[in-house]
Structure formats: C-alpha cells, structure tokens
Amino acid sequence: MDSKPVIHQAYQSFLGLIRLVHKYGLKRMEASCQRALKGHSFNFKTIEQILANNMDQAYPDPPKNYTVPENPTARGAENYSE
C-alpha cells in the first residue's frame, strides 16, 4: 500500500490481483508471483502478462551441476612439485 502515492491506487491494484486469482486460479497466481519476484518486477501489469502468456507454466531452469570431465592426458599435482 505504501508503494502508491494515493491509497486508492494501491487498492485498485489489489482488486485487480484478486480478479486474476478468480480468472486463472490460485496455483497459477502463486507461480506467476514467484516468477515476477525473480525478475524484480512485481506490479500488476507484469503479473497479468505472465499469466496471459502462460509464462508461469514454463519449466524452471534445471540446476546446473558442472563437473570437470576425466582426461587421461592431464598431469596431476605431483608433476608440478619441486
């Protein structure tokens, strides 16, 4: 409510979010809010666009596990000791 200069404007955004819950459902609304928070943009228009474009249903990026591949020709630490 503190983000708008007039409390009525903040209340209208809140009512808009409630309408989106009725239109798209609570589960999708929650997913779209989480996605908006990742992008640091959390206004009504952003949430509405995420829901309209089904971006809340996109799969999240899988965690990347980077490992160094085995290399039989690589020398170990013992080759560099004095």
Image (tube, rainbow, N blue to C red):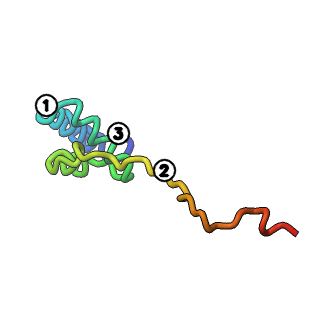
Q: Residue at x 34, y 52 (%)?
A: 41
Q: Residue at x 43, y 47 (%)?
A: 63
Q: Which mark is residue 65?
A: 2
Q: Which mark is residue 1?
A: 3
Residues at marks 1 and 3, CA–CA distance in whole angstroms: 21 Å
Query: Looking at the image, which is closer to me, 73 or 69?
Result: 73
Contact? badges 2 and 3 (CB < 8 Å): no
Q: Residue at x 29, y 48 (%)?
A: 43
Amino acid type, mark 3: Met
- Locate residue 21: give its quadrant: top left
- Looking at the image, residue 35 lies above or below residue 18: below
Residues at marks 1 and 2, CA–CA distance in whole angstroms: 39 Å
Is disc 3 placed on a helix, strand or loop? Answer: loop
Q: Can residue 4 be seen?
A: no
The spot of residue 57 in percent (x, y) is: 22, 43
Contact? badges 1 and 2 (CB < 8 Å): no
Amino acid type, mark 1: His
The spot of residue 56 in percent (x, y) is: 24, 44
Residue at which label 1 appears = 22
